[in-house]
Amino acid sequence: MVFCLLLASCRAGVPEVVDTLPLRHASPEELVTIVNTRAHELHSIRALLQLEARGKYIPIRRSLNMSLAYVRPASVTLRAFDPLGRTLFDLTSNDTAYRIHVPSQNRVVTGTHAAVEADTTSDTPSMRHRMLSLVKAVSQTVLVTPIDDTQTVSVTEDSQLYRLDVMNDTHSTPAIRQVWFERINLDVVKAVIFDDSGNPLIHVDFDDYRGIGPSSGIQFPFHLAIQDLASQSRYTLKFTEVLPNPVLSPTHFSINE
């Protein structure tokens, strides 16, 4: 095992407890500041990654090489390639609509997210449903979502971890998000996203933090393990290259091409 607890270029998951590295203490306000600082540092990315997908409606475990462009909160392009570099599919999505291009079939599918969510005609999710579930999982986990002033938080100490519960109103309402911090570097190592009734929708584990950007000053997790409970799918994202905060014009996410 490579020990890289305090190196800016490599931090992996929950560090092992080392006697000379005491657990850090942090207040709820400090943890919120960490979340919001990291959200401010990174609002868009371009990246290359390997995606592994498996689940109830994914017949075999799939591994794809992909490129990703993402601007928070909901502008995403995902392009998958075969081993020869040919495009398998090109998916563009914003907060209301999507466009899927499959070159091998010379086929383009467009629509709105609202129409897909309202389509309950089949118990088996279509390929379109599965692709858009992946987009939703990516857009809700890859970049840190800030905590705004209208939300309230509470903190629970759990041995080597802090758990930050984020609520839209008072402490009596269900959490909309839970964020776990390890207590050596105070990196985020896990998060859960809930619906309005408090049911978990997405669970994600973060690992392999590396420095990106000027002087490697921004910490980014190069390994994400995402469980999409709604679609009963699991995705593993292994990033190979990440460009922080690229300038991406609105036409990059155009649905009408």
Image (cartoon, grey):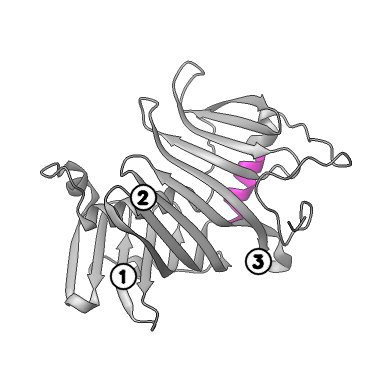
Residue identifier under label 1? 90
Q: What separation in Å lies between label 3 and label 2 (alpha carbons)?
A: 25 Å
Q: Which mark is residue 168?
A: none
Badge 2: residue crowd in 10 Å (few <14, some 14–19, many ≥20): some
Q: In the image, which residues are magenta?
A: 33-42
Q: Is residue 41 left or right of residue 9?
A: left
Is tag 2's residue or tag 1's residue first in the polypeptide sequence? 1
Q: Foreground residue, 36 or 189?
A: 189
Task: Please provide percent x and percent y for residue 211.
Answer: 68, 61
Amino acid type at mark 1? Asp
Above-or-below relation of 59 to 188: below
Q: How many marks?
A: 3
Q: Is residue 118 left or right of residue 155?
A: left
Is tag 1's residue or tag 3's residue first in the polypeptide sequence? 1
Amino acid type at mark 3? Gly
Q: Foreground residue, 175 or 40?
A: 175
Is tag 3's residue or tag 2's residue first in the polypeptide sequence? 2
Residue identifier under label 2? 136
Amino acid type at mark 2? Lys
